[in-house]
Image (cartoon, rainbow, N blue to C red):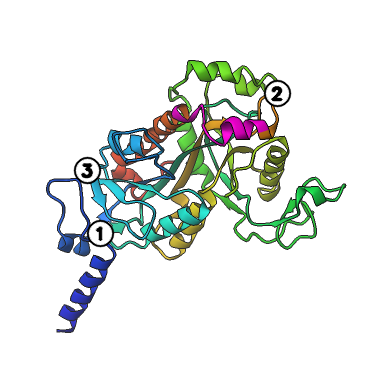
Amino acid sequence: MIKTALCCITATLLLLTGCNSPTDTANPKSQASEIQTPIEVKVVVVTMFELGEVSGDKAGEFQRWKERHQLNQRFAFPQSHADLYLNPESGVLGMITGMGTNRSSSAIMALGLDPRFDLTNAYWLVAGISGFDPNDAPIGSAAWAEWLVDGDLGHEIDAREIPSDWKTGFFPLFSAGPYPEKRPPNQGEVFQLNDQLTNWAYQLTKQVELADDAVIAEERKLYTQYPNAQTKPVVMKGDHMAAMTFWHGEQFNQWANEYVDYWSEGQGKFVSSAMEDTGTAQSLFYLDRAGKADYQRLMVVRTASNFTVPAPGMTAAENLLNSEGHTYAGMELALENAWRVGSKVVDTLAKNWHHYRDHLPYEK
């Protein structure tokens, strides 16, 4: 009787969290089977936004994954930004976290605690677009990150009141000014990913054929002071700054480079800028401690949809108001290349699950 009562309570709780979810498949699994056997997920593809519908219209970060990887089994996910989509044959699960570290952290935590899924051996791939430092690579390029640095946690003084001998008005918590010699305790300002897994992903994808665009090729010629911005798109290794504020301009770009260098203690190199990845990493770090996920299986690839500084001859305000803050000329190119690079990793992991389930790819 006690066992029966517990089963009824469990079933009721799971129903309330969305286990009896609508799907796009003709024969969805029953609620009972989902309760008894959580679905083993091989790879979670983490995207941050979609422009409209998840299929059939102008694509955001998620749509290519849904359509090209047949992520057709839908699971209601009301506790977060958007529903989840699974390919039950490949074991690939796709999600849209929503924009910003607050949404990404809550979405990852909600998924990690969802009883419908077994994520203990899953790999996590963040695949999204971002701003790139033109000193490093052109629009359309992809960068695999080992270091994720948070650009929100800190002290800040208005730029009009910065002391003349300070490089920046933004400086670490629990410090007396910019870049103290002894780095303060890490409160979530920096996350280091598994460098061997990051390098494996880079080596696997560095020869992937990236898309290019004639209009973008003309626009990158404007960046005459940035030789690396004028080449064709490349796959590279480069680190990431996550901040909720869409910052832009030479002064902030210099700060991002210095801040990533500071928090990684000289090991990281700033390349890409977006909003979510430290939130994702923080939740996975906690889920790892709870035995729900493996932080060592997190990978982040960001592609360049725009630059973090304007082209020579244009002010930061002009560029932000006229283009960067409204339309991203390189967005389609960046979205396509995020999928091309990321799908190489996802397919490799899913197709070789017999080995990668229990062994990281760089392990023999």
The magenta-colored residue range is 318-332
Point 68% across, 38% down: residue: 253
Lateral position of residue 279 relative to residue 264, left or right: left
Q: Amino acid at mark 2?
A: Pro
At a point 63% along the width and 53% down the height, the residue shown is 152
Q: What residue did someone put label 1 on?
A: 38
Which residue has dot 3 on it? 89
For label 2, the residue is 312
- Cα gap from disc 1 to disc 3, whole angstroms: 15 Å
Report the residue at 76% width, 57% height from top: 182
The quadrant of the picture occupied by the N terminus is bottom left
Indicate which label's residue lies in the foreground, 2 or 1.
2
Label 1 element class? loop
Label 3 environment density (alpha carbons within 10 Å; few <14, some 14–19, many ≥20): few
When the figure is inspected, residue 241 is found, relative to residue 217, above or below; the finding is below
Labelled disc at residue 167: none
- Amino acid carrying label 1: it is Pro
Measured as percent of width and height from the top left, residue 277 is found at 52, 48
**Residue at disc 2, secondary structure:** loop
Q: How far apart, in angstroms, are the residues tagged by discs 2 and 1?
A: 54 Å
In the visual, does 246 lie left or right of 61? right
The kind of residue on which mark 3 rests is Glu
Image quadrant assignment for residue 112: bottom left
Foreground tag (2 vs 3)? 2
First in residue order: circle 1 vs circle 3 = 1
* Disc 2 crowd, CA 10 A, few/some/many (<14, 14-19, 20+): few
**Helix, strand or loop at mark 3:** loop
State whether residue 67 is above or below residue 261.
Answer: above
Residue 30 in picture, x, y percent from top left: 14, 58
